[in-house]
Image (cartoon, rainbow, N blue to C red):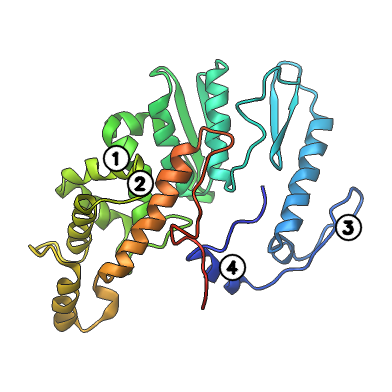
Amino acid sequence: MGPLPARFPQGHEKAKRGKGVRRRVVGGASIPGNWASVLRVDDNKTELFSFLSGALLDSFQLADKQLVITDRGDILSKPPLLDTTSLAPCTHEEADSRMMLHAAHAAHAGRSKITTRTVDTDVVVLAVALACTLDKEDEVWVSFGTGKAFRFLATHEMMRALGPEKAQALPMFHALTGCDTVSSFADRGTRTAWEVWTSVPEFTQVLIDLTTAPYQVDEVVTHTIEMSVILLYDRTSTSTDVDKTRCKLFARKNNVQLIPPTSAALKQHVRRAVYQGRHVWSQALLSAPALPSQMDWGCVKTSD
């Protein structure tokens, strides 16, 4: 599905992993001894996935099953699907959103129980939101984790437990508090952020508003987010100014890891979260979503 653009914080993380070696992927070639080096190169991964898709299609022999495989922006199917317009051509940059596209297609084709396999929390969050869009009888399961931590998650039941509003707002909450493409708040985990969400009921509507936001984030939404971030670092605070709160907390704790971001940094953080939550994830069920410029939303590193 092509390389991801250099976003924060991914650009930094990718640099830490080092550079890989370009390898041609062909049948009969020797298996590389260092897979980590091979998978650092996007072209290697793209070629490998395409090779595996073709090999699986050729070997598939189950007459009572339907096989649908992604191959770059296209799909392969056996038996051939009569209508693939909802699946391809696909321009999704990320596998997590494309998984939701295929899960929704399976549900609309009459499959009432759907299971996805992942070790990525982003997929679990998106599956909860997907369950909101399907029939109430449909079940969306996620086989999650590895080893002793492996478990099956009933995301349709999570959706019902949260309620439709919180389930709809969950992807934006996840984007704001830290996901694969948006950094988290220093020294503050998801559990602390969830406690703040629970204590600020109006935050749910703010998250929903962000999910449907146009190209600007209004002042009321910005104010509520700022207040919530202050509570993330000081649950007893009555301040509504994040910069003043920074000064007070630094004077008290003398540790930059224990104070909230500046208002300017928070503004850019929100913009990146809105790009991911509003423009990418809210269009997960479209094969070719219309995305605004990442440069305009602060998602691309322009200089060091």
Q: Which residue is mark 3?
A: 30
CA distance for labels 2 and 3: 44 Å
Q: Tell me which residue sits at (57%, 25%) in the image.
A: 105
Q: Nearer the viewer, mark 4 or mark 1?
A: 1
Disc 4 and disc 3 in contact, CB within 8 angstroms: no
CA distance for labels 4 and 3: 26 Å
CA distance for labels 1 and 3: 51 Å
Secondary structure under badge 4? helix
Secondary structure under badge 1? helix
- Residue 154 in view of the camera: no
Q: Residues within 10 Å of mark 4 (few under 14, many from 20)?
A: few
Between 117 and 103, the one nearer to me in the picture: 103
Name the amino acid, label 4. Lys
Q: Which mark is residue 14?
A: 4
Vertical placement of residue 8 versus 100, above or below: below
**Which circle's residue, 4 or 1, is located before the other in the chain?**
4
Q: Tell me which residue sits at (72%, 69%) in the image.
A: 20
Q: Which residue is mark 1?
A: 208
Q: Nearer the viewer, mark 4 or mark 3?
A: 4
Q: Nearer the viewer, mark 1 or mark 3?
A: 1
Residue 125 appears at what percent x and percent y?
41, 42
